[in-house]
Amino acid sequence: MKSSIEDFGTGWYGMTIQLGKDDIDKLIECLQLLKQDEGFHFHMFSTAFETEIGGIADIEFSQSSSKDTSNMDIGG
């Protein structure tokens, strides 16, 4: 898995995550667990703290409640 950040220079950032086939299977498994258990959460995290300067350290996935205001969407 590889991640990168793009600085749009406007205060907004883009993020790219490239997944291998095994990563996709693991992500699907974690998302299925998240769907089944609202208390479950999981992380994608950097393994390059010692070899790279800066980047994406951690992304946490958790289930939102009906009270949370959405500010993102999923598209393809």
Image (cartoon, rainbow, N blue to C red):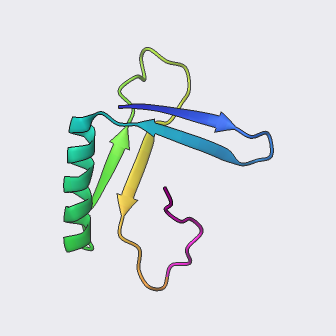
Q: Quadrant of residue 64?
A: bottom left
Q: State how many labels appear.
A: 0
Q: Residue 63 at x, y = what percent?
A: 35, 70
Residue 71 vertical position relative to residue 29 in the rendered view, above or below: below
Q: Which residue is drawn at 24% across and 37% down?
A: 21
Horizontal side of 16 relative to 28 (left or right) equals right
Image quadrant in which you'd find residue 65: bottom left
Q: Which residue is drawn at 19% across and 63% down?
A: 33
Q: Where residue 3 sits: x, y (%)?
A: 46, 33
Which range of residues does the magenta coloring cover?
Answer: 68-76
Q: Is residue 44 left or right of residue 52?
A: left
Task: Name the side, left or right, on which 60 lies relative to 76.
Answer: left
Q: The N terminus appears in which quarter of the rendering?
A: top left
Q: Classify 64 as above or below 56.
A: below
**Residue 51 lies within the magenta run:** no
Residue located at (25% from left, 70% from top): 35
x 44%, y 85%: residue: 66
